[in-house]
Image: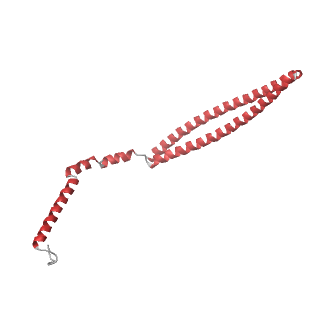
Amino acid sequence: MNQSKNQYATKKDLAATRRELLDKIESIKKELLSKLASKDELKLEVAKLASKEELKLEVAKLASKKDLAKVINRLDKVEYNVELLTNQVAINTQDIQETHKRLDKVEYNLEILANQVANNTEEIKETHRKLDMLLKAMDGVMSEINISRAERAATDHALRRHETRLENHETRIQFLEDKRQI
């Protein structure tokens, strides 16, 4: 079109532009239709989704707030028992460390005595007597340690037995409460 003479479009120009636009619209339609899913494809995808009943069944399998509260309560009890055991272990560890220190002192004293025996043959009898006393003291300490260990083992066993009884009582109480609610 010659724009210097006439600034208006002719019918011929408008018709050509219309054809070009219609061709572009048609090609865009074809492109969009090729990218869109068909009804059958959409139906297949919808069929893959879970039904309401299936979702309800899956939700029913999940733990309730009451179940979670029970678990949390039990975890709190376990945490408390672990804390008690940790404290007891710390106390026992401290006792063992003190016993080791005492044993180290006894060993140190034994070394001193052994050196004195080697250097002074006249004091051998006296040294043997002192060694006997120290060994008896060590035997006493060891017997106290063994008694303490046996007492700890008995206490631990009793605690486990009581814990089992408590859990059985909790189960019975829960059963009775659940039965009463029905």
Please tell me which residue lies in front, 104 or 175: 104
Q: Position of residue 110 (x, y in %)?
A: 79, 27
Q: Describe residue 150's horizontal placement relative to residue 78 as left or right.
A: right
User: Residue, x 20% and y 49% (percent of image)?
Assistant: 40
Question: Where is residue 46 shown, x and y percent of the image?
Answer: 26, 50
Q: How is the image coloured?
A: secondary structure
Identify the image quadrant of residue 22: bottom left
Above or below for 10 versus 110 = below
Image coordinates of residue 80 in percent, x first then y, are 58, 44
User: Horizontally, is 4 left or right of 45 in the view?
Assistant: left
Q: Position of residue 57 (x, y in %)?
A: 34, 45
Q: Nearer the viewer, residue 25 or 53?
A: 25
Q: Residue furthest left?
A: 12
Vertical order, 127 against 2 (above or below): above
Q: Is 103 located above or below residue 37 in the figure?
A: above
Q: Quadrant of residue 16?
A: bottom left
Question: Which of the pair 178/45 is nearer the observer?
Answer: 45
Residue at the right extreme of this rendering: 122
Quadrant housing residue 89: top right
Q: For this view, does 73 lie left or right of residue 115?
A: left
Name the residue located 86 percent from the left edge and 24 percent from the top edge.
119
Quadrant position of the N terminus in the picture: bottom left
Q: From this viewpoint, is residue 131 visible?
A: yes
